[in-house]
Amino acid sequence: MATIFEYLKWRGDLPFSTVRPGEVDGVIFAMTAYVDYTKLCHGETRTMSEAAAGYCADGKYEKVNLGLILPSRQINKTFCEAARTRRYGGSLITDFKDRTDSAEGYQFSAVTYHIDGGRMVVVFRGTDDSIAGWREDCRLAFLDEIPAQRMAVEYLEMVAAKYPEEKIYITGHSKGGNLSVYSAIKCSDGVKERIVRAYSFDGPGFSRSILNSEEYGKIRDKISVIIPQSSTVGTMFEKGDRYGVVKSTNTGVFQHDPYSWPLEGPRFVKLKELSKVGKKNEEQFRKKMSKMTVEEKREFVETLFDVIYATEATTLTELTRGGLKKFNTIIKTYGGLDKERKEMMTEILLRVLELKKA
């Protein structure tokens, strides 16, 4: 079966004015969001091919480290291979924003591509290697709106006003997918009318109250949520009924990697439903969340990250460097929790260590 890179070779000579963006294009833009645009554009407005000129020369991009959980070489290769095509190369990169605050516990990054045919693609970056970003993700369990969601709405409104003649696509992977859909739900009616499609690729879902809202109803038919067969992240919270399940060649949490999703023509290989593992992940998450009050969720999340920050790590990469020795230090700091909460916290931390082994 085909891969994203084979898609770039197959469709690369066709401009977006000839063949409009589809779900695979949505993933390609979503994954390029993880690239460091400060190094690519240096504060200037550049086309994708211009930005790639130095960054991609002589395979230098292969040495760029994007952190523990991101497939660094594939992401950088995606940007460089796309930049060489007629379809992507002329896309103008504008309005890059990047904000992370460990003290406040948020991480937000967005960029806009202007493509053929009077369209723009607003791209929200997913959670990176920063612990601040993961803390913010977990706060979705008890906050009506996290800072990155508010910033995503503000960003979408800003670029929509700045480029009033362009139709809008929105996309993102992981938390970026959540921000994509959230911004589409919460933006003004005028912006909603200009949105062609809002993609979420294995992003966390939402509360039932959001999916039952009038705002969601107005944009529902323009939302595309895609999750892999045994999804972990995408089965967090409610997905609504606008989602599709795709095949992955990886197992477990590593199905979160879109490079493991095979293609048939211009689309990912679709399945009728989640696998047994995917259904179990969804059921277990809902069961655990239903047992906890909002305040208990808040206490658990904040305690978890307080003890992680006690290690002085600011990224997942740093957190795993100490291995089991650092893990034992963490264990000692949450001795006051009840048995069930300790087990949940231990399971989460062990999964982090497993990421390093993979």
Image: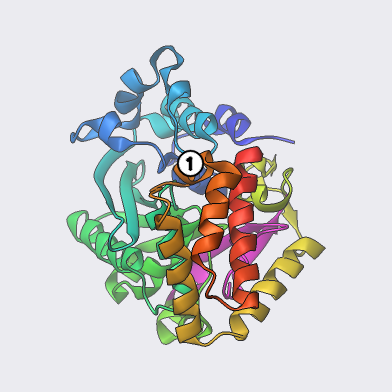
Coloring scheme of the render? rainbow
Decide if residue 187 is on the left or right side of residue 67.
left
Residue drawn at the location 29% of the way across and 24% of the way down: 50
Q: Total of numbered circles in the picture?
A: 1
- Label 1 belongs to which residue? 317
Q: In the rendered structure, which amino acid carries the disc numbered 1?
A: Thr
Q: Quadrant of the C terminus?
A: top right
Of the pair 173 and 317, the residue shown nearer to us: 317
Q: Quadrant of residue 287?
A: bottom right
Q: In this view, does 352 lie above or below 145?
A: above
Decide if residue 1 is on the left or right side of residue 168.
right
Decide if residue 235 is on the left or right side of residue 28.
right
Q: Does the magenta stretch include residue 237?
A: yes
Where's residue 195, x and y in %? 38, 63
Q: Quadrant of residue 236?
A: bottom right
Residue drawn at the location 46% of the way across and 16% of the way down: 59
Where's residue 40, x and y in %? 29, 30
Q: In this view, does 318 lie above or below 246?
A: above
Where does the magenta region start and end?
Answer: 219-247
Q: Is mark 1 on a helix, strand or loop?
A: helix
Of the pair 261 and 121, the residue shown nearer to us: 261
Of the pair 351 and 322, the residue shown nearer to us: 322
Where's residue 155, x and y in %? 26, 60
Q: Does the magenta stretch include residue 44?
A: no
Where's residue 141, x and y in %? 49, 75
Q: Is residue 203 visible?
A: no
Q: In which quarter of the image is residue 318?
A: top left
Q: Residue furthest top?
A: 58
Q: In which quarter of the image is the N terminus?
A: top right
Q: Residues within 10 Å of mark 1 (few under 14, many from 20)?
A: many
Of the pair 44 and 70, the residue shown nearer to us: 70
Q: Can residue 296 be seen in this view?
A: yes
